Image: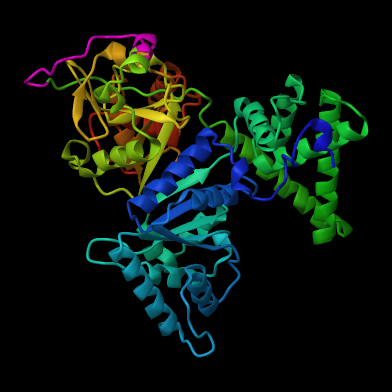
Amino acid sequence: MYASYFGLKENPFNLTPDPRFLYHSPFHREAFDHLLYGINERKGFILITGGVGMGKTTLCRALLAQMDDSTKSALIFNSFISDLELLQTINHEFGIQMDGALATKKDYIDALNDFLVKTFQEGGNACLLIDEAQNLSISILEQIRMLSNLETEKEKLIQIVLVGQPELNDILSNSNLKQLNERITVRYDLKGLWLKDIKNYIEHRLIVAGSQGGNPFHKGVYKRIYSYSMGNPRRINAVCDRALLIAYYKEKEKISKKIMSQAIKDVKKETSIQITRETGWMENRAQTVILLLILGVSIYFAVKFQNYMPQNIMSDILAIQQKLQAEPEIPKAESKSEITQKEQTKPSKKTASLFLDNRNSLAALFSLYKNDDKYVSGMKKPTSLSLVSLNLEARHLKRLKKPFRIHLPNLPDKDSSLRYLLIFQKTGSGPIVLNSDNKEIAVSKDFILGYWGGMISWVYPFKNKSILLMQGMKAPDVLQLQKILNSCGYPISTTGYFGHQTFNQVLKFQQDFDLIPDGIAGSQTRSLIYQMWDGNELHS
């Protein structure tokens, strides 16, 4: 209705999961990286969780749209199905022709196995993606686990992606699903947008919808949008759509703070009415009180959890040890502008090969962790591997110890895709970078700093990312935390008890590296400590 009024070709804030509108926030990019890694490396099971409206379905459709012809895909979005219907749907999605009237479960599985083997022999891969997986019954989930047994001696024939709301983690923790839960080695919990992402998110959708550069949203409305939505893309879409509609009726060219406040009020009211109609709880005062209490507790934990999330600046640390016996030749330090000018006049194959695309850099990063004894010696196998991406100031480069990649969003190139520098290790002679041929190239520190953009990524192994170590706890994990902090220059008595001394040192560590200073060793604090630590064994 309002599209042409604002110079748009279509509605930019539809709630349908159109992959064209996917905005790659840091969290959505990480989730996408996890999906690509799990599928390309044939990990078998990948788990993506996230709250309602976080963009999980859009992310999955964008993934399917990006897959090449060598990867056969099947998408299941109706999770309220029986075990036989599941097999029928999978085979149908893969294009496997069968006589459904006579086929048994064994017939469907045999046909699926034949299809997967043929695909594998032709050099292809197969991906089964199940959306809203939290609605699957335990028996269906167990049957899905059985499908993962379709494999060769070395490779998984089918990669299964389970996408669902956070309660899916609770379902998988059921003792009857222990085998399935242990097979999931790639996991990611999708979060909402940061305040700084709101403007870019809105402008991205406007451009996809046909905008020629004009933004009708006043710069003062973004904080209000974030306060209401808490970064939830679906809520952002709802209030922006309503705001454009209000401005259209009032014949306003800009979305002012007043219009946005009215839009938020309208959406809140409609949401409240919808809940009332669907549940009928408002007819019962006692049940209404219960609902309000539940909402209050949910909001409390949502806000509390938000405080643990990284705020644009997560620091890492690492120190350079080990010197190469034979010192490699170090390229002359050059500024970014000098290198750019040199590439434009006379491209250097060696320099160009240092800049990896997302897929190759991600695969190499996980491969380094998986195959190099230097980084996995003595480590108990973790349940999961996570890709941590954080903003880090260049001054901390010298303290990074484990392999990591530097994001290069502004690197001049023939295309606009993101590029990365993969730092294998640092020696007394300088950093060692892996090029596109997987060869080690020695470069200077100034060369790295010339391309430093702030965002870096590394692999973090964990057994239970949700564990919070805090004051008053006594556990082996606390003892390990104390030992690690000691080795990193934060002296603590290694008692295994999280007392006042441990609290102060965790707090100091967080302050030193721009983490939220709450004295709690959560997943982000532990992942940062892991990056700056010489050892590898993790309990939690």
Does residue 167 sit above or below 27 in this rendering?
A: below
Q: How is the image coloured?
A: rainbow
Where residue 332 appears, as percent x and y from the top left, is: 23, 9
Q: Is residue 396 left or right of residue 220?
A: left
Q: Is residue 269 magenta?
A: no
Q: Which residues are magenta?
A: 324-341
Q: Nearer the viewer, residue 424 or 330?
A: 330
Q: Quadrant of the N terminus?
A: top right
Count all numbered tags in the image, as a single digit. 0
Residue at 41% over, 83% down: 106
Q: Residue furthest left?
A: 325
Above or below 449: residue 80: below
Whole-percent x, y for residue 140 in the image: 50, 72
> Which residue is rendered at x = 38% and y = 51% of the image?
38
Q: Quadrant of residue 204?
A: top right
Instruction: Write the residue at 40% across / 74% down.
Output: 112
User: In this view, which residue lies farthest toward the right?
Assistant: 250
- Horizontal side, residue 135 vs residue 369: left or right: right
For the stretch drawn in magenta, what is the main secondary structure?
A: loop
Residue 77: x percent and y percent? 59, 62
Q: Is residue 151 visible in the rendered structure shown here?
A: yes
Relative to 352, say whether 93 is above or below.
Answer: below
Rendered location of residue 49, percent (x, y)? 52, 50
331 drawn magenta: yes
